[in-house]
Amino acid sequence: MSRNLFKSRLLLMVLIGFSLLVISSCAAPAYYMGADEAVFEDADYVPAPEERAAMEATDTDYKTYTNGEVAGERHVRHVIRNGSIELTVSDTREKIRDIHNIAEEAGGVISNSNIYEMREGQYGANLTLRIPENNFSRVMNELETLGKARNIQTGSDDVTMQYVDLESRLNNQKAQEERLIEILEMAETVEDVLEIERELYRVRGEIESMTAQLNHLDDLVSLATIHVNLREEAIPTGELTTGPFEGLWSRIVQTFTGSINFILNATSIVIIALTALLPVLFILAVITFLTVIVVRKLSKRKRANVSQSLEKEDSKSQT
């Protein structure tokens, strides 16, 4: 009897709790965010923008979603754009000047250039352009008009998550730095001061490293990179051209000047070598001089002894 009564009371309590849960969920002002504005379950009430801002400011549980992201927590996309293009041109140097003008008009620069000779009178070049991101497409289109374009490539790398993560960790390190400075001011022993300073040195090193990484990402995002490869058209074998004679006088002068410089360099090396050997030559000269003197004295003494012995023999023979 008592068991049945307990079961009936328990069932009644469960039903009452479930009813209260259903009632509270129906009464709650649930809302959802569509493409442009929030749509509430209560279709008769849509808050004005001012009311919505006030609710967001006062109620931490009130969240408005736009394109799947929480308002106030959205981040600007950080995308690195890059491209490459190969051009066959009639005159490499002339097209380099044109590319320089295109980059300058777009607010960019040629960060790297390399001009080389493929064969006699035929040149090629590799250029690296840094262009503001908003002018990337326009510059690529203008480059295509400079010659016969081939192997055109464009790409992008979204580094938003990397940027946000790095920025968040940087802010955490800065907060930790401020906290360590506060603790350092309260330190009483030398050991505590040294330990806190070591940790502060480590944190500041992390801050400098992360700041450099953020600056590098900002540079890559703000300025797109374009690699340009220029190849000069081959001279047809059936046509005469004065290309090999272009700049002939300057090449002659350059070769002659190079020969003169080689001779002067060789002469200077010989003079320097002789100057470096002067102490050694002086010592050798002294040794040679002393050796000659000693040899001469010994030879004189030997000749004197020989003459004396001869005189003695002559005197003996006479007696």
Image (tube, helix red, strand yellow):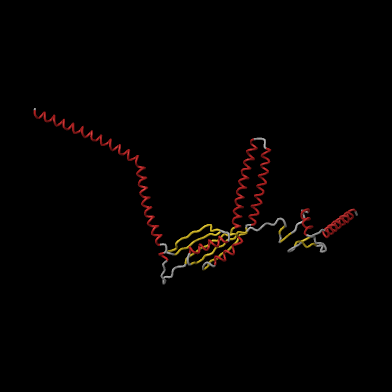
State left or right for residue 43 relative to residue 5.
Answer: left
Quadrant showing the N terminus: bottom right
Image position, residue 82 (x, y; %): 58, 61
Image position, residue 131 (x, y; %): 57, 60
Nearer to me, 264 or 51: 264
State left or right for residue 65 relative to residue 156.
Answer: right
State left or right for residue 247 relative to residue 288.
Answer: right
State left or right for residue 305 relative to residue 98.
Answer: left
The answer to whether 310 is drawn above or below residue 46 in the figure is above
The answer to whether 30 is drawn above or below residue 309 in the figure is below
- Hey, which quadrant is residue 13 in on the image? bottom right
Image position, residue 263 (x, y; %): 36, 52
Image position, residue 22 (x, y; %): 83, 59
- Hey, which quadrant is residue 184 in on the image? top right
Q: Residue furthest top?
A: 319
Residue drawn 35% across the image and 46% down it: 271
Residue drawn 47% across the image and 60% down it: 115
- Hey, which quadrant is residue 308 in on the image? top left
For the image shown, how many numbered marks are present on the structure?
A: 0
Residue drawn 72% across the image and 56% down it: 72
Quadrant showing the C terminus: top left
The answer to whether 232 is drawn above or below residue 289 in the figure is below
Q: Residue furthest bottom?
A: 238
Q: Residue furthest right?
A: 1
Residue drawn 59% across the image and 64% down it: 138
